[in-house]
Image: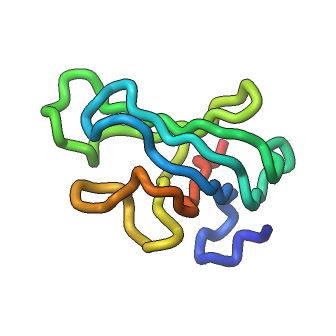
Amino acid sequence: MTTQRGNGDRAVVEVRGAWYGEVGDPGRSFAGQVTASDLPEVRVGESVIVLYRVAPGRTPGAGQHGSYTLNAGGRTLPLMGFTCHDTGMTGQEGNDDTAEATWQALILPG
């Protein structure tokens, strides 16, 4: 995979999977398998979990104030974004993000 999606030099990992748990549930997580990766340490076929956490003290439902992390093989990578590649939309109320789909994780540099 190459970063030819307008992401500059940022690494991208594509994952096929779905979200589990209710929106707003702190235990909610995304589970899937890597289908493509710019990072040699995150291999195609590897199982991953993505978590979304809201900063303490934020108003419930203010989803834009949280952060995503991708957990793969004992590594935790912070994400700049995590969007549904199949629809081009982020998981939000009204989207069925519990259905299996391809998602794109944009890894924070560093």
Numbered marks: total: 0
Residue 73, image x, y percentages: 76, 30
Q: Is residue 28 above or below residue 30?
A: above
Quadrant location, the C terminus: top right
Residue 96, image x, y percentages: 34, 58
From the viewer's side, name the closer residue of 64 and 9.
Answer: 64
From the viewer's side, name the closer residue of 102 and 68.
Answer: 102
> Which residue is located at x 46 percent, y 60 percent?
83
From the viewer's side, name the closer residue of 81 and 99.
Answer: 99
> Which residue is located at x 69 percent, y 64 percent?
9
Q: Quadrant of residue 56?
A: top left
Q: How is the image coloured?
A: rainbow
> Which residue is located at x 81 percent, y 53 percent?
44
- Would you say 28 lies left or right of 94 here? right
From the viewer's side, name the closer residue of 69 and 48.
Answer: 48
Quadrant location, the N terminus: bottom right
Residue that sits furthest to the left in the current view: 59
Residue 95, image x, y percentages: 30, 61
Q: Is residue 74 above or below residue 99?
A: above
Residue that sits furthest to the right in the current view: 40
Residue that sits furthest to the front in the current view: 99
Q: Quadrant of residue 55?
A: top left
Residue 21, image x, y percentages: 36, 35
> Which residue is located at x 62 percent, y 76 percent?
5
- Would you say 38 lies left or right of 23 here? right
